[in-house]
Amino acid sequence: MNTSAKNGQFTVKAYQGDARTLLAFNLPKARTKNLAGFTIQCQPKGKESYFLFNTLRFETPADHEQVASESPNSSVNAPIHKFRWVHVPGSDHQGTSPFFGDYTYTVTPRYFNAKQSMLKLDPTLSVSVTLPMQPFTTDDVSVGFTRGFTQSQAFVRHFGKKAIFRPKKKELLFDTSQVSGKNDEGKSYTFADQYQWLGFTARKRIFDITNEVVKNKNLRLDAFAYDLNEPDVIKAMLTLAAQGRIRVILDNAPLHHNTTKPTPEDEFEKEFTKQAKAPPQLLRGHFGRFAHDKVFIVSDDKKNALKVLTGSTNLSVTGLYVNSNHVLIFNDQSVASTYAKVFQTVWDKKVQSDFSKTDEANKPSAFTLKTGPKMEITFSPHTGSVAKGILDGLVARVEKEKTQSKGSVLFAVMGMDETATGPVFPALRAIHKTETIFSYGITDTTKGVALYKPGNKTGVLVTGKPGTTVLPPPFNQVPTVGLGHQVHHKFVVCGFNGKDPIVYCGSSNLALGGEQQNGDNLLAIRDGDIATVFAIEALGLIDHFDFLNKHAAKAGKAGKPAAAPADASKSKMADAVGWHLSTNDKWVGPYYDENDLHSTDRQLFA
């Protein structure tokens, strides 16, 4: 869903994401002379309004019109120097449990006078738009994302740089209500507090399903699991095991199974078998390489499949609370029945590689949902020719964007190294070189990074693993993810804002080897609203990590951040290094330079 409004030649467009909003602005070039930025006021329905914050402020706020009751970093006093902004409610104004409902955004362009002093806000220039701010859901499909921002200012502010994600004793089943640590202000928090914030809407989707099944004795659950160690998920699964209302197909590849040093999955198997009412309800296997699906199928006591949850999110502490991931729930019996049939086939075949010979593996399953989305789902492992055909089709859709007047490709893909086989990664690695489209991508691979360059129309490709960063004041230093993954997504959005938008997503790593050897599901969803939700997820990640990547590249030379007074506020730390908002309109130039990606960005989104 998107909406737009105009005031003369000033346009504001708002796009609904998953518990977030993308705002984009446009002005004719002639109206950008002396432009000081944009002030954004936010009005949750029935709640007190507030101005969004800018991390930076003017060096000397008193030289500019200021609202005395507002912080110098409020966008009414420090307007935003960008033509689009992703708003995620919470943090500065609503804490970790923000209001969901209709939000009205009022955006006002601000101007300097001839002496480079910002003028008073002129409400006659403002534009207001209203749309829902809530987790994305329709009658047929719901989408959820993990927050995936352990390397962020917000995470450090809430939990501190040295936060842990599970007890040091590494027990499988632990009480998540126990205190996990203290933040920099000395406030204690629990593992559950961390998990709720980090798991974001994906966590809620997963627990909505498990809680629904646990509470309703007429429902059953079939689950595909790969990584499995999230304690509260496991507790729900063990409750269902004791009642004979769950079956689990669990990966037993070497990273998940060890006879001498049991893995968390081995510990789960032991506990599950002990509690199961009517064994066997659990099957271990790994096809040619991995049983890589992450799926919940809900059925009634007559074995009618009712709904299904799928996506890239592993049912693990890392999968939910460190990785950037997605889930989708289809409240559609035809989709759920297809997944149920695949589950039964895999169960009957005891997770063997000859699944590639079945109809489910060789023919895409096509659906048109009641609310409009059309999609195809493929289930692997496939034969070599079928796998190649599927990935070639994805690449052809990416290449098609090069022929569109406002073509775009946005993606978040875990691995894109040269050792992976198949056509997808070479295409995504090369797409940023194409200047005729807007391309924006993020991966955990550290090679081939291409950051934004002023005066250049080539696209952006960032890594979610920038390594050690040295951030300048007023920013806090942030932790790294170590050997784990930041980006665990596997999605590609083509044709945002176009006539044929599509998002590819699911558990598939989009490599030829995985499509031939792993149990996976790959979805191709043709729907503008769902493509928009994924595009906004990509924008948030890429913008954030583009900033971290730039400072990682300088880390070796920068050494330590510039010194600031002890216990200094962020504004004082900014003063210490002289980093403030500019007092001229030079920041606007790239947005109107036809040879700059910022201009392509403005035209695509606004």
Image: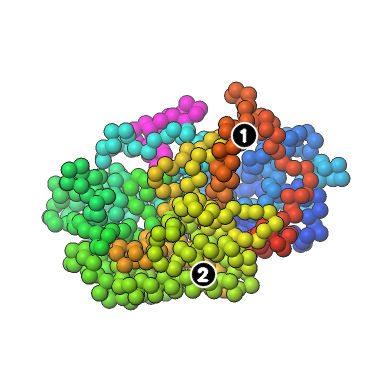
In reply to whether residue 184 is colored magenta, the answer given is yes
Colour scheme shown? rainbow
Quadrant assignment, res 566: top right
Query: Which of the pair 515/67 is nearer the observer?
Result: 515
Q: Give the image location of residue 529, x and y in percent.
A: 52, 65
- Number of numbered tags placed on the structure image: 2
Instruction: Residue at 55% x, 46% y: name it.
Output: 549
| Left or right of 396 in this view: 402 | right
The residue that appears at 31% across and 71% down in the rendered structure is 382
Q: Callout 1: helix, strand or loop?
A: loop
Answer yes or no: is residue 193 visible. yes
Residue 569 is inside the magenta segment: no
Three-letter residue code for mark 1: Pro
| Rendering quarter of residue 221 | bottom left
To which residue does mark 1 refer?
473
Residue type beneath disc 2: Val
**Residue interval drawn in magenta:** 177-197
Position of residue 479 measured from the top left corner of the image (x, y, whole percent): 47, 38
Crowd rating for badge 2 (residues with CA inside 10 Å; few <14, some 14–19, many 20+): many
Q: In this view, does 206 lie to the left or right of 302?
A: right
Vertical relation: 536 (above or below) 69 = below
Q: In which quarter of the image is the N terminus?
A: bottom right
Eyeballing the image, is 366 above or below 534? below
Q: Residue 398 carries which label?
A: 2
